[in-house]
Amino acid sequence: MYEDELKAIIGRVKSADENMAEQAQKRWDSVAHPLGGLGLFESAIIDIAACQSRLIPDISKKAVAVFCADNGIVAEGVSQTGQEVSAIVAKNMCTGQTSVCNMAKVANADIFSVDIGLLNAVDDERITDLCVRRGTADFLKDDAMSREEAALAMVRGANFAKTLIEKGYNLLATGEMGIGNTTTSTAVACALLGLDANNATGRGAGLCDEGLEKKRKVISEGLKRRNVDKNDALGVVAKVGGLDIAAMAGFFIEAASEKRCVLIDGFISAVAALVSVRLCPACNRFLIATHESAEPAFQAVLSALEKKAFIRANMHLGEGTGAVMAFPMLDMALSVYKNMATFSEINVEAYKR
């Protein structure tokens, strides 16, 4: 049932306006500055213009959806932190006491904490309750979730994107919170891209050498036991993924269907983006990479998406912080694009490509 609903959402995604992208490129070239002077920021503004079908895009109202979920694989000792922390951080987002909340105040963005699968429910009316199940199963012993649960999480993520867009948000970003989710995202990346877990697995929030080796073995063995099919993205998420990954994938797809760009945060968001693109290739045009994660598999995921991130700061905080860091940068780039004098206006011959 939910898989059919997901297919219907995918079917509504249309191509971006490539004619508008060409016009936006011409506008950048007319601005009195060196051609391509703002590099990837120029490309990002062109992408947003193409997605919104507006020569001067509007990114004035920003929102970050932070999907919170717990992962049963934590039982295998792949994290140095217990699952109770997930609910604590999700609660702190409601009260504005996390890193991303403080950063969002500066970036003039709104943060939405979403329970898509926390093991322990958060007693706060400010959290959005979209919970599919109370944490996933340990994928070393069983599928993380059923196929229908994975599809339901994607549908709920998609519906939340629609809700934010209906509220007037015109630039979106994803974030996540959940102990153990670098394990699930690495497993999904390895499954979809055929990566070796021994090389693709990172330290996450800060594992020691012994913990890292255990994490590598757990992912390798889990992938073997679950017998994943790289051509079945939904099945991969159901077998070894997380509810946060599923929800973000659905969020990306629905945003594309509504002609809105979404900023990819770091590794986990990028893996969710890869899932969304495997399910719906057309949505890739609506995704913008923001910062380069320190996780070893990140570059392989970004390469598969054919994206380049414009922030290189060795960040690995999560919560959507990298995407929020990008908001004011895009505001500055748009200001140049929108307000800068053109070569003709200052009587200077334009640069030629």
Image (cartoon, rainbow, N blue to C red):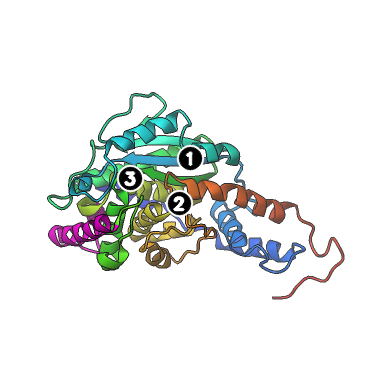
Q: Residue at x 60, y 59 (%)?
A: 41
Coordinates of residue 134 in the picture (x, y in percent): 23, 35
Q: Is residue 352 magenta?
A: no
- The answer to which of 314 and 223 lies nearer the viewer is 314
CA gap, disc 1 to disc 2?
A: 14 Å
Say left or right for 301 vs 120.
right
Vertical position of residue 145 compared to residue 127: above or below: below
Instruction: Check disc 2 and report the residue beneath it.
Output: 265
- State the extent of the magenta-drawn residues as a range: 209-237
Q: Residue at x 43, y 33 (%)?
A: 93
Q: Give the amino acid at mark 1.
A: Ser
Task: For mark 2, give the secondary structure.
Answer: loop
Structural distance between the alpha carbons of marks 3 and 2: 13 Å
Q: How many marks?
A: 3
Q: Amino acid at mark 2?
A: Asp
* Residue 86 place in picture, x, y as percent: 32, 37
Label 1 crowd bin: few (<14), some (14–19), many (20+), radius 10 Å: some
User: Label 3, label 1: how many angstroms apart (C-alpha)?
Assistant: 19 Å
If you read the primary sequence from the N terminus, does the residue marked by circle 1 or circle 2 appear first? 1
Instruction: Examine the rendering and report whether any part of residue 130 can be seen.
Output: no
Answer with the quarter of the image where residue 274 lies. Answer: bottom left
Which element carries disc 1, helix, strand or loop?
helix
Question: Does 139 sit above or below residue 81?
Answer: below
Q: Return the residue at label 1.
A: 99
Q: Which residue is mark 3?
A: 244
Q: Residue furthest right?
A: 347
User: Is the C terminus in the top left, top right, bottom left or bottom right quadrant?
Assistant: bottom right
- From the top left corner, tell me how far across and down residue 316 is, in percent: 43, 52
Task: State whether residue 203 appears in this view.
Answer: yes
Left or right: 176, with 76 as reference point? right
